[in-house]
Image (cartoon, rainbow, N blue to C red):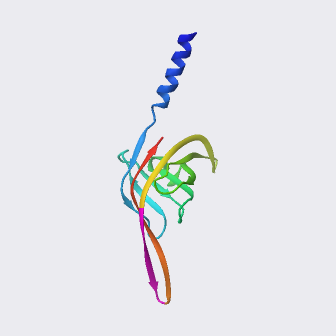
Amino acid sequence: MKKLVLVIALLGVAGFAQAETVDLYTTGGFGCLHQYHDINTSLGDVTATAYLPQTGTGGMTLWFSDQVNPTNNSFYSYYYGAYGGNGVPTVLAKCVFAGGVCVPNGEQLTVTLNETFYRKQINSGRAHYWCTHWTLQSGTIVR
């Protein structure tokens, strides 16, 4: 019985140790929006897309290019959660589309983004406004 408990415990530890770390590489933001499209990753051909809150913290979504349905160019699944901010590990939950509705499946990942930004004044005729331009310097995903 002790051997069985030991084997189960070791299998649990081995399963836990199997976490995959994916590196995210430097990319510019998407204009004035806090979004990164086609982020190159250490997965080779697989890229990531991230939509983040415009100011500090808030809702975040993350997609991987290998989760796209080639028939209609929509995603099979995506990850969502509350973005913790620059350099803060953020836990995202996976949502899988089933019958047109996205259903959480219990899978999670942790993403940490290291970003920089600058603000630029935009002048258009009499209209003047400030735009924040974001750059992803690096990042990691543990899944």
Identify which residue, 119 or 41, lies in the foreground: 119
Q: Against 117, is 5 above or below?
A: above
Quarter where residue 18 is shown = top left
Find out whether residue 138 is within the magenta segment: no
Majority secondary structure in the magenta region: strand
Quarter of the image for the N terminus: give it. Answer: top right
Quarter where residue 83 is shown = bottom right
**Residue 82 placement (x, y as % from top left):** 58, 54
Q: Residue furthest bottom?
A: 126
Q: Residue at x 51, y 16 (%)?
A: 7
**Residue 31 placement (x, y as % from top left):** 44, 69
Q: Residue at x 44, y 60 (%)?
A: 36
Q: Against 8, is 20 above or below?
A: below
**Residue 129 placement (x, y as % from top left):** 50, 80
Q: Is residue 70 visible?
A: no
Q: Residue at x 36, y 48 (%)?
A: 45
Number of residue marks: 0
Q: Residue furthest top?
A: 1
Point out the stretch of residues depicted in magenta. Answer: 116-125
**Residue 38 placement (x, y as % from top left):** 41, 56
Q: Is residue 18 visible?
A: yes
